[in-house]
Image (cartoon, rainbow, N blue to C red):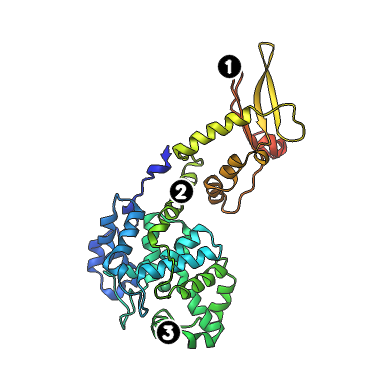
Amino acid sequence: MVSVNTVCFDFGSGVCSNSQEIATMSRAQLSAQSLGTYYAKDLLAKTQGKDPVNCILALYDSKEGRSNYIGEAISQREHGAQAARAALEDGADEDTIIAALLHDVGHLITQAPQMQGNLGTRDHEGLGAWFLRTLGFPEKTCALVERHVEAKRYLTWKMPEYYARLSDASKGTLAQQGGPMTTSEGEAFEKDPLYKTIIAMRTYDERAKVVDMPDLKPIEAYAEMMRRCLRRKAIRDMYDRDGYVLLKDALSPEAKKLFVQWADEIQAWDASVKGKWMIYYENVNGQETLCRTENILPYHDGMRRLLCEDEVKRIVDELLGEESALFKEKINYKLPGGGGFPPHREFSNHCGPKLDPLN
Ligand SMILES: [Fe+2]
Ligand SMILES: [Fe+2]
């Protein structure tokens, strides 16, 4: 049983397991990322047992977060917030908006090796993705952070004139990130399922270098969105591990109150109305007793929003790995003396006995 309000994260599992072994290896034996993860150990130790969102916010509130984004006259905080705004305005999903917000978080792990020419943390994309995975962010967010530099490598291969438009700092980092893609790399990249989103991330990154952007929401304004992303990932992991998801206190106290109020409203709907909702009865000691209402959502805005637009839908989308669609909805009642709804399986009801492997 897991309460979504108190999801527990095991920060220890992603950290280099054997620092002694790492310490005795030569630097040449280690990739930038494994060195980075080694150097980020202190940072992770500080986050252990703490709320991951507060850890991220503290990082962006630090000297590094408030200092200049490499080669640009804005801070890392502003750069992330501007990229997230661009993603939001583009209608991106929450995992992508958070990826835009945190795409350069690797640059804030300044204990890690730096690129030549004061161009920030080496392999900041890999290190940032590793850090976010360790904190429990969704795989899509981490993959977009990990791969955001691929867009620059791709565009400079696809459009050589794109290179001329890059800032000096950007040209410098490109050289240290592998330079333009080769033809085979570029062609493979175009077939990648994340291709379009990674290119979109590049446009958000480019639009995020405005000095004193008016009405810019700070990083802190995305705290709740980050929490939702973390919660969905935790639910996904729970489902993969246990085969079911049990959400305790998934609704806020206000939402719970409304839910009960709405159920009471629906229970009182007029049974004589035809062609809209469907009301069913059971026989209790010779009396017709209400037992179920179906086809509710077209006639109840609050319930429809809760189940089909807000957090419930996001959780279901996350579990399915694609956009969900409502199959059917109903409220079952157990009034005094009523039978209630006995344990049952939906599968054979809706998919037919031939498809049910247990029938
Ligand atoms: Fe970057
Ligand atoms: Fe960036």
Q: Would residue 35 be visible to someone looking at this image? A: no
Q: Would residue 213 be visible to someone looking at this image? A: yes
Give SS at disc 3: loop
Q: Is residue 220 left or right of residue 288?
A: left
> With respect to residue 184, does 217 lie above or below?
above
Residue name at image x 47 percent, y 46 percent: 235
Which residue carries the number 1 mark? 336
Q: Quadrant of the C terminus?
A: top right
Q: Horizontal and vertical percent for residue 126?
A: 39, 68
Residue 302's image quarter?
A: top right
Residue name at image x 58 percent, y 43 percent: 307
Could you tell me how far apart the alpha carbons at marks 1 and 3 are, in whole angstroms? 73 Å
Residue name at image x 71 percent, y 31 percent: 278
Could you tell me how far apart the alpha carbons at marks 2 and 3 are, in whole angstroms? 41 Å
Q: Is residue 140 left or right of residue 355?
A: left
Which residue carries the number 2 mark? 237
Residue name at image x 53 percent, y 70 percent: 200
Instruction: Name the front one of labels 1 and 2.
Output: 1
Is the residue under label 2 in contact with that under label 1 (CB below 8 Å)? no
Front residue (pair 341, 349):
341
> With respect to residue 161, does 229 lie above or below?
above
